[in-house]
């Protein structure tokens, strides 16, 4: 199943609808050619459409989101500005933010930045417990964007504030929301359902992190266009294949090198990976980047099997250090386990590994199977024996491991790289604006 970008429309009387290009291609192929050539006609129409937008469409985009306090998360929008030089992007970002990642607390301070077509505007907030901005317009009065993309939770107060200021200062802007929720939820109170209805009414399109997320949106009655893509993506200029021999030598690695990157929490499944590794009948080295409450359990499992010396607990590392380490891995495993309140929403580390030329293995929790597609191996979550068999298969078949790594890099470049996301967003926004201007 592909997780490539797509935009679905329905037949409701929504203000933003683009042509059903596949249906039109089917009609044209039936009239002009043969029905079997519909895909060729469709692909040609898509290419012509993209070319038209690139030549004719200019836009001002404002993107609101706390995710951009991390510099690496801005790459897709910087790339947007580089590719589409006649358009401009402004990121609206909290000036100060504190975040807990892999068990470590990190503070971010954002400075203003301006270039020809890319700008970062830091916004002061009320007391950290009050999730509102100390601003009467969050710069929308000056910017007057064509697109206002809100990458915040739909129920966040910052989202409500942005929608209010849009109505006051930039009423002509097309609003694109964003959500990663992939578990069906029941509203605890009528006011929550009302807030969701108002949110749906006041936005014109959505970005959904996964196909499951889109399904939840549709289940809750959202009938407007949806673009399925990760909100940040992976920067192919940082994540790329390379020779990791020096890093491996520093680890004193023996046998296949297996990586885990993430929080050591029960739902991330690292305990299952520990149990699977000790069941292998060959040498291996396990690189663990991250920290958390199950580290003691993992150490106990490895120690009981006499394999503790085969693990390297690197703890939390700044993200800038991880790409070089990723290139030294043979396999990256994301063994997430679904709980009553959470399942894997995307697994960006999979995309980063794919771009790095690393073979990926993941459980079937949440969006993982869609992200991996046919470019890796998926096993039933919580099934330690199946995970052991997957790893043993990759150990015994280095040709398969290499083929999956190459396939994964192609898949990530086409779907999850910052360049791919920039192109997807530009085309999606262009269709929305074209629908508004008709």
Image: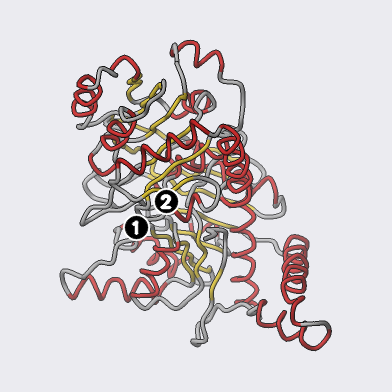
**Above or below, comparing residue 15 to residue 395 in the picture:** below
Please identify, in this view, whether the residue under mark 2 or under mark 1 is nearer the observer: 2
* Quarter assignment of residue 391: top left
Residue 192: percent from left, percent from top: 22, 70
Q: Is residue 101 visible?
A: no
Residue at image point 57% right, 58% down: 4
| Circle 2: element type | helix
- Name the side, left or right, on which 87 lies relative to 339: right
Q: Which residue is disc 2 drawn over?
A: 368
Q: Which mark is residue 153?
A: 1
- How far separated are the C-alphas under marks 2 and 1? 21 Å
Horizontal side, residue 270 vs residue 3: left or right:
left
Of the image marks 2 and 1, the number of the one nearer the N terminus: 1
Q: Position of residue 191 (x, y in %)?
A: 20, 73
Residues 390 and 121: in front is 390
**With 34 as the anchor, is 162 left or right in this view?**
left
User: Alpha-carbon neighbours of circle 2 within 10 Å: few (<14), some, or many (≥20)?
Assistant: many
Q: Position of residue 413 (x, y in %)?
A: 62, 45
Residue 249, how many percent across, how many down?
50, 11
Residue drawn at x 39%, y 48% is 379
């Amino acid at each position: 199943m592909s997780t490539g970008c797509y935009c679905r429309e329905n037949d409701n009387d929504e203000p933003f609808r683009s042509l059903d290009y596949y249906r039109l291609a089917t009609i044209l192929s039936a009239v002009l050619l043969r029905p079997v050539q519909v895909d060729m006609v469709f692909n040609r129409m898509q290419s012509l459409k993209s070319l038209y937008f690139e030549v004719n469409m200019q836009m001002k985009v404002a993107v609101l989101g706390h995710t951009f306090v991390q510099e690496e998360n801005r790459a897709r929008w910087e790339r947007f500005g580089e590719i589409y030089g006649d358009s401009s992007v402004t990121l609206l970002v909290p000036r100060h933010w504190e975040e807990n990642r892999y068990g470590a607390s990190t503070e971010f301070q954002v400075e203003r930045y301006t270039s020809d077509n890319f700008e970062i505007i830091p916004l002061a907030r009320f007391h950290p417990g009050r999730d509102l901005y100390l601003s009467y317009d969050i710069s929308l009065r000056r910017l007057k964007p064509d697109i206002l993309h809100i990458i915040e939770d739909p129920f966040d107060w910052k989202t409500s504030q942005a929608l209010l200021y849009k109505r006051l200062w930039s009423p002509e802007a097309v609003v694109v929301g964003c959500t990663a929720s992939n578990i069906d939820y029941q509203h605890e109170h009528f006011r929550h359902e009302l807030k969701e209805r108002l949110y749906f009414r006041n936005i014109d399109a959505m970005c959904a992190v996964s196909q499951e997320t889109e399904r939840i949106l549709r289940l809750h009655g959202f009938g407007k266009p949806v673009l399925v893509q990760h909100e940040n993506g992976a920067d192919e200029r940082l994540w790329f294949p390379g020779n990791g021999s020096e890093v491996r030598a520093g680890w004193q690695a023996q046998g296949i090198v297996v990586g885990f990157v993430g929080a050591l929490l029960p739902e991330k499944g690292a305990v299952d990976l520990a149990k699977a590794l000790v069941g292998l009948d060959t040498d291996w080295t396990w690189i663990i980047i991250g920290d958390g409450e199950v580290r003691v359990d993992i150490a106990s499992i490895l120690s009981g099997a006499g394999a503790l010396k085969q693990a390297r607990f690197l703890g939390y590392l700044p993200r800038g250090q991880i790409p070089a380490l990723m290139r030294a891995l043979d396999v990256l495993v994301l063994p997430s386990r679904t709980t009553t309140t959470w399942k894997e929403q995307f697994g960006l580390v999979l995309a980063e590994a794919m771009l790095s030329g690393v073979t990926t293995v993941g459980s079937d929790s949440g969006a993982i199977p869609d992200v991996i597609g046919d470019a890796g191996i998926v096993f039933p979550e919580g099934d330690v024996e199946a995970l052991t068999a997957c790893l043993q298969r990759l150990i015994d078949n280095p040709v398969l491991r290499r083929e999956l790594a190459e396939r994964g890099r192609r898949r990530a470049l086409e779907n999850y790289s910052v360049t791919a996301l920039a192109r997807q967003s530009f085309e999606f926004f262009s269709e929305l604006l074209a629908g508004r201007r008709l």
